[in-house]
Amino acid sequence: MMKNRIVRGIAGSFILISLLLAVYVNLNWLWFTAFVGVNLLQSSITKWCLLDTILEKFGITE
């Protein structure tokens, strides 16, 4: 379950960071927020996540 926590933590961090960048730098950072959301939706439908694959290559498993 460690891998799932890492994936959720990174996704949540990306969303919060991109929201802060949208507020303080440029509203176009909201496109990154949308990209992360679309990837989360896609992974829930296909049961495949690129970050899962990357973490496995680093030796992080369930």
Image (tube, rainbow, N blue to C red):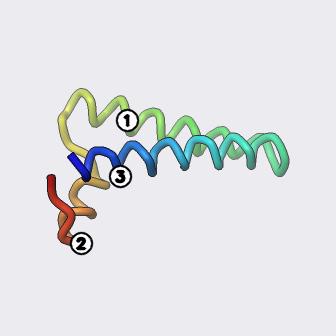
Q: Secondary structure at mark 2?
A: loop
Q: Secondary structure at mark 3?
A: helix
Q: Amino acid at mark 2?
A: Phe
Residue that appears at 55% across and 48% down: 14
Q: Earlier in the sequence, mark 1 or mark 2?
A: 1
Question: Which numbered disc, 3 or 1, marks the residue closer to the eye?
Answer: 3
Q: Secondary structure at mark 1?
A: helix
- State the CA–CA distance, disc 3 to disc 1: 14 Å
Q: Nearer the viewer, residue 44 or 31?
A: 44
- State the CA–CA distance, disc 3 to disc 2: 13 Å
Q: Amino acid at mark 1?
A: Leu
Q: Earlier in the sequence, mark 3 or mark 1?
A: 3
- State the CA–CA distance, disc 1 to disc 2: 21 Å
Q: Is residue 26 above or below residue 56?
A: above
Q: Residues within 10 Å of mark 3 (few under 14, many from 20)?
A: some
The residue to which callout 3 is attached is 6
What label does residue 40 carry, if any? 1
The residue to which callout 2 is attached is 58
Question: Which numbered disc, 3 or 2, marks the residue closer to the eye?
Answer: 3
Q: Position of residue 26 (x, y in %)?
A: 81, 47
Q: Nearer the viewer, residue 19 or 1?
A: 1
Residue sticking out furthest to the bottom: 58
Residue that appears at 25% across and 52% down: 3
Residue 27 quadrant: top right
Residue that appears at 23% across and 27% down: 45
Q: Is residue 52 above or below residue 38?
A: below
Say left or right for 39 vs 15: left
Disc 3 to disc 2: CB gap under 8 Å: no
